[in-house]
Image (cartoon, grey):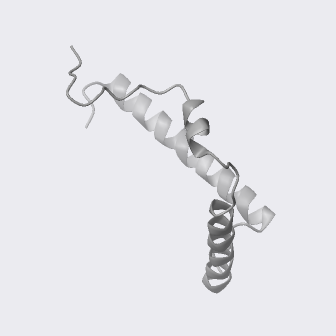
Amino acid sequence: ECATPEVRNFVREELMAGLRMHERISDLMVQKGWLHPYQPDEQLRLDLVTAQRTSNLAKLPLFKDRSKVLEAFDTAQKPARGSELQ
């Protein structure tokens, strides 16, 4: 539900833009052979191969000391135990 016709039109336009983008991405994936919408057996085979490759990548020793990698990211620091943020 939308409060005004302007909001309704905005929501409709955004929905249609999202659907058009989904269509373009799906078409590209079919052209590249990454998506097989009418061949579920082939899509399952491809998904299993992709999942295995992803799992293998996750096991690679990319960083010997992962703590140094984590320090490189600009993230909020956890407060020390017993201290409270004010």
In this view, the residue in front, 77 or 48, is 77
In this view, the residue in front, 64 or 24, is 64
| Residue extending furthest toward the bottom | 41
Residue drawn where x is 40% and y is 26% of the image: 77
Residue drawn where x is 48% and y is 35% of the image: 14
* Figure check: 15 above or below 29: above
Q: Position of residue 15 (x, y in %)?
A: 47, 41
In this view, the residue in front, 31 or 12, is 31
Residue drawn where x is 63% and y is 53% of the image: 23
Q: Position of residue 83 (x, y in %)?
A: 22, 23
Q: Position of residue 34 (x, y in %)?
A: 72, 66
* Figure check: 44 above or below 80: below
Q: Is residue 6 left or right of residue 38?
A: left
| Residue extending furthest toward the top | 86
Number of marks in picture? 0
Q: Is residue 12 left or right of residue 65?
A: left
In this view, the residue in front, 60 or 8, is 60
In which quarter of the view is residue 80 placed? top left
Q: Is residue 18 left or right of residue 29?
A: left
In which quarter of the view is residue 66 placed? top right
Name the image quarter holding the C terminus: top left
Name the image quarter holding the N terminus: top left
| Residue extending furthest toward the right | 32
* Figure check: 76 above or below 29: above
Residue drawn where x is 61% and y is 82% of the image: 40
* Figure check: 19 above or below 40: above
